[in-house]
Structures are given as structure tokens and as C-alpha cells.
Amino acid sequence: MSVRCCRGRLSVWAAVCVLVLCWFYIYPGSRLPRDKEIVEEVRRHGGAWHRNQTGIDSYRKLLTECCDPQRMFAVTKENSPLGKVLWYDGEFYHSHTVNNDTYPLFAQDNPLHLPLKKCAVVGNGGILRHSECGKDIDRADFIMRCNLPPLSKYVDDVGSRTHLVTANPSIIVKRFQSLLWSRKNFVESMKAYGSGHIYMPAFSMKPGTDPSLRAYYALADASSNLTMLFANPEFLRTVGKFWKGHNVHARRLSTGLFLVSLALGVCEEVTVYGFWPFSVGLDGRPISHHYYDNILPYKWVHAMPEEFVQLWHLHKSGTLRMEVGRCPTPQEGRS
């Protein structure tokens, strides 16, 4: 009897050990360096950066093979004809069949004039505050921004030009009351982004579909200069799998990493600004989560430090450039 009990206990402990090992294998983020260690690593590296054309070409090839961003980043008439089933990437068992109501809303094909040359992907990190990166950002040929950020009060730090800006449906719901009442405030707010594109994940989560479609109609009815693009859920799904294979494990990638993935696939040179998920800057002083507020993201949704580590590796290899401090003036030049 005692032998059986011992064997039973050993089996339980063996099962526990296997589960622990599986946890560490599936969620390597638990083995990430602490935030302070990552900041120290960035500080030690300094500001030197050297372009690596081989690395740039290699990453573009990897992303083209897995995700085909040039053709698939947005839902278009070309990749999503009538009758095509769009499976939501953020929810299981939900889909949308392209019909006569939604098909006319899609662009004919990729609306971006490829290849794009110098691209700037602008996150919303608090590290942008007092960075004086605005002029540097505005010199890019194509500028991508995340989640309808405010610009006018922060032009010196974030610039004023925009070619593509994302809009999470939750913003439409919270900030503009789902566009169920007046749409004037929404249309007026969108004028800050000029005549570029708004990029919305209308087919990622079912509750986000109707607000996204209302945003489309609000801009169309107002004859806005902005063009609405809907993120292709197949692209979002494959990009998520790509980064999971590179040790980014999260319920969902951040909007910023989706944009960086797009940029690496369609741009000749990529510079990233405002990607800094830490509460202190390189000088050790506390900084806000966003350059315009200190509202923290929901826990367990994104894995921002993991994303930063991967982007920092790409920076050190010369595949993209990350600006994580004050931008140099033209007189100062770059190291």
C-alpha cells in the first residue's frame, strides 16, 4: 500500500514538473530580463546605428513568405471577393461573408504606392514627450500612427504629417459614443490626419464590426479626404503567428507591432518612434505611459516588453532604427 502511495505522489509531482516546464516553454516572457535591466542595456548600447541591407532584405522576405503584407494587409476587392468568408482573428467561430453591403466598401487593391522608401512608425509612448522628434518624423516619406493620437499640441515632439493612422473600434465606442448620435465631432477630429488612410480592424472582434462600418459611412457622408481601409484578419492572424515564433507571447499583439510588421514588409527603410513600455526613461526619470496621458493598458492583453526586446534586436542588427530619446537636430547629425 505504501509503495502505491509513494508511486502516486511521484506521479503527481512528475505531472506538476511537466506542467511547469511547459509553462516556461510556452510563456518564455517569464524569463525576460527585468525592465531595469532592459533600460540599462539600451543605455549601454548608446545611439550608434548602422544600416544592414542584408538584414532588411531578409526580414522583408520572411514577412512576405508568411504574411504577404503587400497584398494582404487590408481587405480589398482583389483578395476578398463576393462570397469570401473572413474569419475573425480575435474570436473563435465568428466570421463575416463578404456580401453586397460590405464588398463596395473595400479598396480595389493595395492603395499604397509601393515600394515605400523611408517610413516612420510612430507609437504613443511617453518617451516622445520633449523628444523634439517632430521634424525628424515629418521628413519621412510615409508616416504611420497608432490609434488616433492627438497631434496639434505635440507637433514639436511627434510631427504633424500622417499617411496612415489606426483606429481601434473601442475608441469609436468610448470617445464618439459608437457614432450612434452626432457624427460631427468624429469627422472634425479626423481632419488632423490630412488626406491619408484610416486603418481599422473591423473584422477582428465581432463587437467592433458595426462601429467600424459606421466610421466608414460617417467619413463617406461628409466627403472626407480620408480613405478607410479595413485590416485583413488573415494578415493580422499570420503576423501574430510570426511574432509568436519570435518569442512574443500575448493574447494579442499591440497595434504598433502590427504597423512595424507592415512597414518591414513594404518599406525600404523603417524608423520607429515612441515604442517604450517602461515607466522610466534613459535618464532614470519617470515618464508617462503615453506622451499625452498616463492611462495604462489592460493587463494580460499585450506583451509590450517582449515586443520591445524583439524590436531592439532588430535595431542592433541594423534592420530598423529605434529612436528612444531626444532626436538629434540636423546640425548635430546622427552617429
Image (cartoon, rainbow, N blue to C red):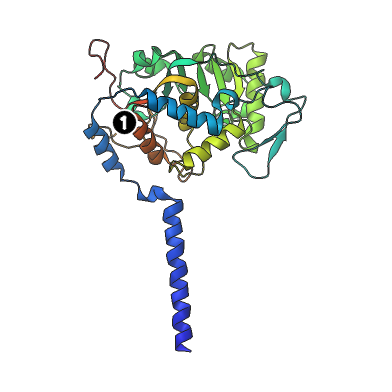
Q: Within 10 Å of the Cα at label 1, are there few (<14), some (14-19), or many (20+) other Cα atoms? A: some
Name the amino acid type tagged 1. Answer: Lys
Task: Indicate left or right for 313 with 88 as reference.
Answer: left
Task: Indicate left or right for 292 with 196 as reference.
Answer: left
Q: Quadrant of residue 327?
A: top left
Residue 170 shows in this picture: no
Residue for badge 1: 316
Tell me what residue is drawn at x 22 percent, y 34 percent.
44
Residue 7 shows in this picture: yes
Q: Nearer the viewer, residue 137 or 284?
A: 137
User: Circle 1 sits in a helix, a strand or a loop, which is it?
Assistant: helix
In x, y percent, where is residue 138? 40, 13
Depicted 71 relative to depicted 196: above or below: below
In x, y percent, where is residue 328? 26, 17
Q: Quadrant of residue 50?
A: top left
Q: Exactly how many numbered labels are in the figure?
A: 1
In the current view of this chain or complex, which residue is farthest to the bottom?
Answer: 1
Q: Quadrant of residue 320?
A: top left
